[in-house]
Image (tube, helix red, strand yellow):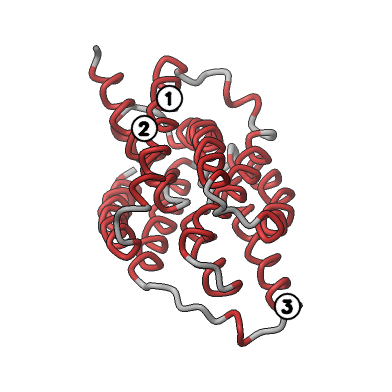
Amino acid sequence: MTAALIWAVVSGGAVGLALGALGGGGSVLAVPALVYLLGFTPAAATTAALIIVTLTSLTALYAHARAGNVRWKAGGLFAAAGLLPAAAAGAAASHLPQPALTAAFAGVAALAAVMMLRPPRATAGESTDGVRAVRATGAGAGLGGLTGLLGVGGGFLVVPALVTVLGFEMQAAAGTSLLVISANSLASLATRGATTAGLDWSVIAPFTAAAMLGAWDGKRLAAKVSGTLLRRVFAVALLAVATFMLVDATLL
């Protein structure tokens, strides 16, 4: 077994655990792993991450749906609002300089860490259904653009939004987030067909397989471990990734 294959399997397992347990965070682990451990360029890594996250999210979505953790109506609203922004941003991503993509991704990872460290409080009762729908639509559009531009599913932002705007419990937010991630990632991939030609499938295939298996383990882990503990551990890892990538971007 080569070093690249080992890193692909280990990284894929971590990505799957994050998606299965938290309903997000897979992309902010996948992209740095592909760039720094497996030698992908930032542009290729974002496309590869979309492929990996799409298939893994669909796997995790199935697991959460079986447990009744998916709110299809709310997830559909988020997803529908993000489809066009995801497609447009995905088409524009290939024209941006790689240092800019790296720096932007570092900023997103840092934001994700901050949001993970701040446990969300349910505030849905303070707004009318119409106001919550508007907020959900706006958040969905913004996250769709983020998915297309940086190759991230946006689950680490969807989960807090579902909890604070719509008053979801953590497990329901994680399951519904996977529906949004899957839809946004598919929309973005639709505009990146040409960029998949030069990808190293000998790395992406085992990475994806390990991630899909890890998603099932993550779902089981979420039922046994405190959600607060999971968020805190993940936030620390994200801060480390964000710092490393930001330093690297300034040196490019």
Mark 1, secondary structure of its residue = helix
Task: Please say if the residues under marks 1 and 2 sit with CB atoms less than 8 Å apart.
Answer: yes
Tell me the residue that label 3 is attached to.
129
**Compared with residue 158, is residue 134 higher up or lower down, i.e. above or below?**
below
How far is mark 1 from mark 3, CA to CA?
40 Å
At which x and y percent is residue 99? 42, 45
Tell me the residue that label 2 is attached to.
12
Mark 3, secondary structure of its residue = helix
Q: Nearer the viewer, residue 100 or 214?
A: 214
Q: Amino acid at mark 3?
A: Asp
> Mark 1 or 2 closer to N-term?
2
Q: Quadrant of residue 126?
A: bottom right
Task: Please say if the residues under marks 1 and 3 sit with CB atoms less than 8 Å apart.
Answer: no
How far is mark 1 from mark 2, CA to CA?
7 Å
At which x and y percent is residue 110? 36, 60
Indicate left or right for 122 with 206 as reference.
right
Q: Amino acid at mark 2?
A: Gly
Q: Nearer the viewer, residue 118 or 202?
A: 118
